[in-house]
Amino acid sequence: MTKTTVYLPEDLEVRLDAESSATGISKAELIRRGIAMLLDEAERPKRSQELPVFDSGRALSPEAMDDSVYEHIKVRAARR
């Protein structure tokens, strides 16, 4: 495990102490469980795929860039 310092407002510290005393579960374990619960229930945005990078060594016109991107998409789609 890795040690991490967390600063809690006094009211949360009091509630955490009370929960730890009532349940017999250490404060550290209660904090770990709370973090795990939060992360397990979090809705994460889908990771977008990286855009392809084109380096022709020269600047392309917008139309040529569109054609190049379209061609790349066609090649990728054909692999599926």
Image (cartoon, rainbow, N blue to C red):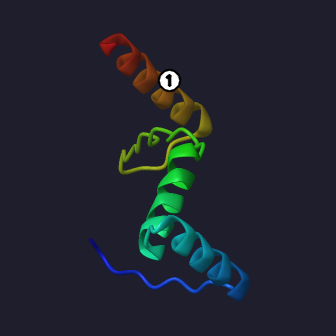
Residue sitting at x 51%, y 43%: 60
Residue 36 lies, with reference to residue 67, above or below; the image says: below
* Quadrant occupied by the C terminus: top left
Residue 42: give x, y in percent of width and height: 58, 47
In front: 40, or 43?
A: 40
- Residue positioned most to the right: 11
In the rendered image, residue 8, in percent from the top left (x then y), is placed at 62, 83
Q: Residue sitting at 69 percent across and 88 percent down?
A: 10
Compared with 9, 78 (above or below) is above
Quarter placement of the N terminus: bottom left
Q: Quadrant of residue 62?
A: top right
- Would you say 1 lies left or right of 47 here? left
Classed neighbour count for the residue bearing mark 1: other residues with Cα under 10 Å, few (<14), some (14–19), many (≥20): few
Look at 46% across and 68% down and name the residue there.
Answer: 24
Count of number-bearing discs: 1
The percent coordinates of residue 15 (x first, y second) are 66, 75
Could you tell me residue 36's position as x and y percent? 47, 55
Q: Decide if residue 56 is on the left or right side of residue 33.
A: left
Q: Is residue 26 left or right of residue 41?
A: left
Residue nearest the viewer, comparing 7 with 13: 13
Q: Quadrant of residue 28?
A: bottom left
The residue shown at (66%, 82%) is 14
Identify the residue position indicated by label 1 in the image.
70
Which kind of residue does numbered mark 1 sit on?
Tyr
Which residue is most to the left?
1
Query: SS at mark 1?
Result: helix
**Quadrant in the rendering for residue 45:** top right
